[in-house]
Image: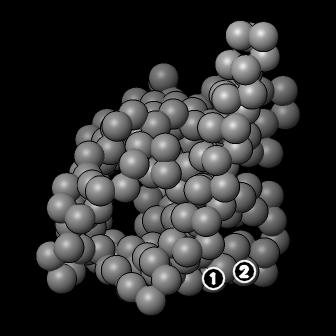
Amino acid sequence: MRIESSFEVPAPPEQAWALLMDVPRVIPCMPGAELVDTVDESSWKARVAVKLGPIALSFDSDVRREEADEVARRARLAVRARETRGRGEAQASIESTLVPLDGGTRVEVVTDLSLSGPLAQYGRGVVHDVASQLVASFADCLRRQLAGSQGEVEAATQAQARPVSGLRVGLAAILRSLARLLRLRRSRAEGGA
């Protein structure tokens, strides 16, 4: 599944690039993620906690930087995550490109995501909506890292450390999916009348 998103940060491309290359600083901005180990300058181990109502999932993840093109300001990470109790896997290729804007930078992110096991049962729309919410939260943390004081930076990463609440995120995703469905039906009804 391909997920495209973008967000803006209030920093010039050079400063945004420096943050993007500092993966140990970026990982804690992902909701529910924590850096476990730095293997070498382009490989890391992370853990991601997700809560789906009463079910808690924990994913051990291997993160590897496959590309870092400073001239094009494009980086690609490969992530392989395994649920610690064998309830599924996820693999992702995440390509980020920085585009200069007046007074800031737009970060364009393209993720190719593959789920297996019980995780794969969730529909594309729900996964896309959950991913969109996670990217929005991630972007907010990055914005604070680039523009905030040291206290704001610490508060931003501490807020992200809590396990991702799938119930809250999932409910919001389901509501957005229902709203899309209603708009589509209304559009079809108006078009056919």
Could you tell me if residue 62 is visible in this image? Answer: no
Looking at the image, residue 126 sits to the left or right of residue 173; the answer is left
Considering depth in this image, is 92 or 170 the residue closer to the camera?
Answer: 170
How many C-alpha atoms fall within 10 Å of the one at disc 2: few (<14), some, or many (≥20)? some
**In the rendered image, the vertical position of residue 159 relative to residue 67, given as above or below:** below
Residue placed under numbered mark 2 in the picture? 155
Residue furthest to the bottom? 54
Looking at the image, residue 66 sits to the left or right of residue 137; the answer is left
Q: Which dot marks residue 158?
A: 1
- Distance of mark 2 from mark 1, alpha carbons? 5 Å
The residue at 66%/79% (across/down) is 159
Q: Report the amino acid beneath label 1.
A: Gln
Q: Position of residue 106 (x, y in %)?
A: 68, 34
Q: Position of residue 89 (x, y in %)?
A: 21, 62
The residue at 78%/10% (across/down) is 193
Considering depth in this image, is 98 or 112 the residue closer to the camera?
Answer: 112
Find out whether the residues at labels 2 and 1 contact each other: C-beta distance under 8 Å.
Answer: yes
**In the rendered image, the vertical position of residue 96 relative to residue 171, given as above or below:** above
Could you tell me if residue 160 is visible in this image? Answer: yes
Q: Report the amino acid beneath label 2.
A: Ala
Q: What colouring method underlies this structural image?
A: one colour
Tell me which corner region of the image, top left, top right, bottom left or bottom right, holds residue 1: top left
